């Protein structure tokens, strides 16, 4: 049984969090539960969290059910975890996020509760690499990223389809995730032909067409060298752009500006890929989050990793920190300009509406940047790149058991048997954003 001094209070006489050395037994007055073995992060290298969006959703459903359960109405509910630092950090992330989403706490209030009393600070999360960590993402960063996503309508568990998320995140089913629903989809790079290569599923561009059309994806941006012909997307009615930069590196200012311009110029959703759809892809989407929603670099990295674990790696983390101020300034200027033009636009709106209503078949050309790109083929060197290795690691993961609920649509063109794979708050937080080494 936990001593009251060990309990972190989130709802008085109702909801608590605790770090315990042994498994407690529930009593007449207290119900204990632990999710350490239920929600487990699938790492690439030395990364260990944060847990993904589906796990957070399922945790929130589980806790909401307990809070409403008649047999538990008079009991204190205690989510407990162990002193193993990685599990403890993920458990704290879950209940902290629940407090932000459902208890309407600010990120700072939720984090203040987590570190209250004698509770030690929590291990910060790191990138999907090995060896020395040079950039930490703290639990507070994750909570603030979730808060920003809620604020801007990016996160909405009322409409979130957990079955679809868990289906399409799998390599065999397409390996893609929405970062901003209806705007940004991050996915693993397509191949010339759908096939299973040494147990690893590869998908041709055509495999994505039905899903893209159904979800209003109108634009595809490729960040790696050419492996498939862009014409296969453009002939199907999608805009396609090439913005190549080297695997594991950071984009130039020209590439960043072009990426933002393309995304700001399209009314539909944008599907972005590199090789694994993690490093380069997450980095440029992070730039958009900072410019348009004023995420900090750490908040953007945290949110993108919650949506698509393993995203933004090594120097790409520091790149986003370096670009934060300039992207905020660009976004502030853009919003100021939009506000200045809003009033005269409103004054002209009725006249313009009457004019447009008389013009049958009127359309506006896309103009601007020309789709397509360089003729160079493949990152075809003999050495495997970072993207190759990450994608291979993801492909080796064992499929999970079937989820309940609506069945997600299977990508056409490749059949993969189930056995095909091998087995002072801010100051306090940044004081802990120091280098540390994890055993691999």
Image (spheres, grey):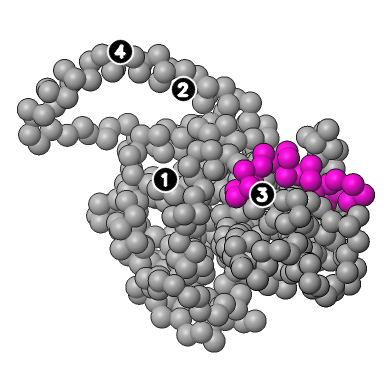
- Report how far apart the C-alphas of labels 3 and 4 lie in the structure: 42 Å
What's drawn in magenta, residue-wise?
A: 100-123
Q: 10 Å neighbourhood of mark 4: few (<14), some, or many (≥20)?
A: few
Look at the numbered discs 4 and 2 and tell me whether their residues touch, using CB distance below 8 Å.
Answer: no
Q: Earlier in the sequence, mark 3 or mark 1?
A: 3
- Observer-side mark, 1 or 4, equals 4
How far across and how far down the image is residue 214, in percent? Answer: 30, 58
Numbered disc 3: secondary structure: helix
**Which mark is drawn over residue 334?**
2
Q: Earlier in the sequence, mark 3 or mark 2?
A: 3
Q: Is residue 8 visible?
A: yes
Q: Earlier in the sequence, mark 4 or mark 2?
A: 2
- Report how far apart the C-alphas of labels 1 and 2 lie in the structure: 18 Å
As rendered, which of 228 and 29 lies closer to the eye?
29
Q: Is residue 391 left or right of residue 140?
A: left
**Which mark is drawn over residue 183?**
1
Look at the numbered discs 3 and 4 and tell me whether their residues touch, using CB distance below 8 Å.
Answer: no
- Report how far apart the C-alphas of labels 3 and 1 lie in the structure: 27 Å
As rendered, which of 406 and 178 lies closer to the eye?
406
Query: At x 46% / y 81%, what residue is drawn?
Result: 416
Residue position for label 4: 344
How far across and how far down the image is residue 173, in percent? Answer: 45, 71
Numbered disc 1: secondary structure: loop
- Report how far apart the C-alphas of labels 3 and 2 lie in the structure: 33 Å
Q: Quadrant of residue 321?
A: top right
How far across and how far down the image is residue 323, in percent? Answer: 63, 31
Quadrant showing the N terminus: bottom right
Q: Quadrant of residue 37?
A: bottom right
Query: At x 49% / y 50%, what residue is drawn?
Result: 156
Q: Is residue 407 left or right of residue 344?
A: right
Residue position for label 3: 99
- Residue 388 drawn above or below residue 11: below
């Amino acid at each position: 049984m936990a001593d009251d001094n060990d309990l972190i209070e989130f709802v008085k006489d109702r909801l608590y969090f605790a770090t315990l050395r042994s498994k407690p037994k529930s009593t007449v007055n207290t119900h204990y539960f632990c999710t350490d073995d239920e929600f487990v992060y699938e790492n690439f290298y030395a990364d260990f969290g944060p847990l993904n969006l589906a796990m957070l959703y399922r945790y929130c459903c589980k806790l909401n059910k307990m809070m409403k359960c008649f047999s538990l109405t008079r009991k204190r509910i205690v989510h407990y975890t162990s002193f193993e630092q990685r599990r403890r950090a993920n458990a704290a992330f879950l209940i902290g996020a629940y407090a932000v989403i459902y208890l309407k706490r600010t990120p700072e209030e939720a984090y203040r509760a987590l570190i209250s009393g004698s509770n030690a600070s929590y291990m910060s999360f790191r990138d999907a690499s090995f060896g020395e960590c040079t950039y930490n993402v703290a639990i507070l960063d994750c909570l603030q990223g979730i808060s920003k996503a809620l604020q801007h309508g990016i996160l909405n568990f009322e409409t979130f389809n957990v079955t679809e998320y868990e289906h399409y995140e799998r390599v065999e089913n397409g390996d893609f995730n929405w970062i901003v629903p209806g705007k940004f989809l991050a996915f693993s790079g397509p191949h010339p032909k759908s096939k299973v290569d040494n147990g690893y599923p590869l998908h041709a561009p055509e495999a994505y067409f039905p899903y893209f059309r159904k979800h209003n994806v109108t634009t595809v941006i490729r960040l790696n060298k050419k492996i498939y012909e862009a014409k296969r997307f453009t002939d199907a009615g999608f805009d396609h752009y090439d913005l190549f930069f080297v695997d594991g590196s950071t984009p130039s200012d020209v590439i960043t500006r072009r990426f933002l311009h393309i995304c700001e110029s399209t009314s539909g959703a944008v599907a972005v890929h590199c090789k694994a759809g993690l490093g380069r892809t997450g980095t440029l989407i992070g730039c958009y989050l900072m410019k348009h929603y004023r995420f900090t670099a750490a908040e953007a990295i945290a949110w993108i990793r919650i949506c698509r674990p393993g995203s933004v790696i090594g120097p790409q983390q520091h790149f986003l920190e370096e670009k934060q101020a300039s992207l905020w300034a660009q976004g502030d200027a853009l919003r100021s300009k939009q506000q200045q033009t809003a009033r005269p636009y409103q004054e002209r709106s009725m006249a313009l509406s009457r004019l447009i209503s008389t013009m049958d078949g009127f359309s506006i050309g896309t103009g601007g940047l020309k789709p397509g790109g360089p003729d160079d083929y493949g990152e075809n060197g003999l050495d495997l790149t970072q993207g190759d290795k990450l994608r291979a690691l993801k492909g080796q993961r064992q499929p999970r058991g079937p989820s309940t609920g609506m069945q997600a649509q299977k990508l056409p063109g490749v059949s993969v048997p189930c056995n095909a794979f091998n087995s002072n708050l801010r100051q306090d937080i940044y004081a802990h954003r120091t280098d540390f080494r994890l055993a691999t």
